């Protein structure tokens, strides 16, 4: 019986390419945890932004199947070495994804708008000096600028553009990225969110968050003619309960106080 | 790179307004067998820019697609087989994609297009 996820011994490597690590494993674990939903979702087009070694996109392709199952895969990375290693990893597992060397999804934003049913992202989330962001080679895999948000904040609007009406986004975040704020920002764009996997290591605390378009929220936005900037209390409450380690200012009339 | 992917790519150079479709310079084209899935093709058909696909197929030496197509043709097995071949089985392995407006070449090596821009193009 074929393995459902990529095998580490078959993952390609190169000194300029980020190797599968805790964050990659957390993302694949999140996809596995949500596999029943993903199989029911029957995504036609899946995309990974920042494919690195190819561990995640290969695992996703193994989980969901290829064209025979009706699914097409596109993966991008800004690092040409990473795209090459991804190609080796895919080939070693006998699966295919279309690969493009590009910055996030540059070149795809026009024609791929509204077509992506599942997007997976393990972004460069490590807080670094801003000048390290987008540097050549392996640094592009982690350098995230202030609060590790520089690249994330570019990916999110692109994800919003490319995701289909029924599109789902799975993204890895670090506590330092302020994931609750990310969820609130996405909420304003009409997305609901939940944590699929939470993992703390000695070095970092990771969350894999799933975002999806919330039809109630979109309806609300279209009825008022604009997106409501006021976040309902219940949303804040639910987010606070998701991120117990994060101190957000609780309002005096908070239901839980 | 499959021609379905080519159909989704545009020139991303700053200021370019007419960056689609990218012209194909083919040096090496591969054919790789893919399982035939008519439902996949029917799902994708409305999203395809037909003229761009016909042009891309011709550029890689495949002339079996009709110049115009409509959804009624999706009932024809013959048509679906040709569409399947053009969209999924033909790969641009080596060559370049050329911006129709500026002539800027984006190289394709080992089937991977490189859309990275120079600083003065972003």
Image (cartoon, coloured by chain):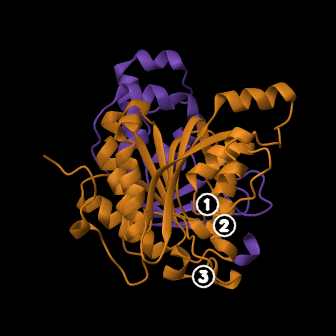
Chain colours: A orange, B purple
Residue sitting nearer the eye, A106 or A171: A171
Residues behind callouts 1 and 2 on a single chain = yes
Q: Label 3 neighbourhood size at 10 Å, few (<14), some (14-19), many (20+)?
A: few
Disc marking residue B104: 2
Residue beneath disc 3: A135
Tag 2 or tag 1, which sits nearer the N-term? 1
Judged from this view, the residue extending furthest toward the right is: A225
Judged from this view, the residue extending furthest toward the left is: A1
User: Taking the image as drawn, is residue B34 in sight?
Assistant: yes
Residue drawn at x 29%, y 48% is: A62
Judged from this view, the residue extending furthest toward the front is: A257
Residue beneath disc 1: B98
SS assignment at label 2? loop
Quick check: A191 left or right of A78?
right
- Residue A92 occupies which quadrant of the picture? bottom left
SS assignment at label 1? strand
Quick check: A66 left or right of B120?
left
Residue sitting nearer the eye, A209 or A96: A209
């Amino acid at each position: 019986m074929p393995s459902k996820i990529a095998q580490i011994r078959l993952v390609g490597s190169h000194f300029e390419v980020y190797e599968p690590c805790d964050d990659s494993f957390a993302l694949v674990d999140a996809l596995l945890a949500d596999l029943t939903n993903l199989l029911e979702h029957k995504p036609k087009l899946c995309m990974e932004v920042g494919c690195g070694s190819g561990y995640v996109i290969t695992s996703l392709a193994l989980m969901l199947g290829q064209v025979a199952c009706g699914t097409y895969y596109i993966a991008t990375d800004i690092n040409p070495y990473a795209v090459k290693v991804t190609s080796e990893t895919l080939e070693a597992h006998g699966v295919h994804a279309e690969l493009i060397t590009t910055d996030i999804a540059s070149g795809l934003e026009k024609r791929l708008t509204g077509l992506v049913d599942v997007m997976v992202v393990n972004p460069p989330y490590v807080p670094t000096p801003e000048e390290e962001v987008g540097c050549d080679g392996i640094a592009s895999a982690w350098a995230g600028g202030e609060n590790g948000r520089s690249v994330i904040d570019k990916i999110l609007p692109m994800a919003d553009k490319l995701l289909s009406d029924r599109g789902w986004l799975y993204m890895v975040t670090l506590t330092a990225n302020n994931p609750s704020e990310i969820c609130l920002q996405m909420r304003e764009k009409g997305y609901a969110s939940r944590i699929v996997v939470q993992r703390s290591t000695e070095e970092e605390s990771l969350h894999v968050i799933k975002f999806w378009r919330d039809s109630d929220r979109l309806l609300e936005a279209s009825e008022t003619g604009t997106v409501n900037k006021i976040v309902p209390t219940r949303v804040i409450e639910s987010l606070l309960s998701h991120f117990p380690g994060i101190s957000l200012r609780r309002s005096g009339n908070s239901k839980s106080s | 790179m499959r021609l379905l992917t080519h159909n989704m790519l545009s020139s991303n150079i700053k200021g370019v307004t007419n960056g689609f479709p990218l012209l194909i310079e083919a040096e090496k084209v591969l054919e790789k067998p893919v399982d035939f899935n008519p439902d996949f093709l029917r799902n994708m058909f409305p999203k395809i820019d037909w003229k761009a696909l016909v042009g891309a197929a011709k550029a890689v030496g495949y002339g079996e697609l009709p110049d115009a197509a409509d959804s009624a043709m999706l009932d024809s097995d013959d048509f679906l087989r040709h569409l399947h071949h053009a969209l999924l089985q033909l790969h641009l392995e080596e060559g370049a994609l050329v911006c129709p407006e500026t002539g800027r070449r984006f190289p394709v090596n080992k089937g991977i297009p490189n859309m990275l821009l120079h600083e003065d193009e972003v």
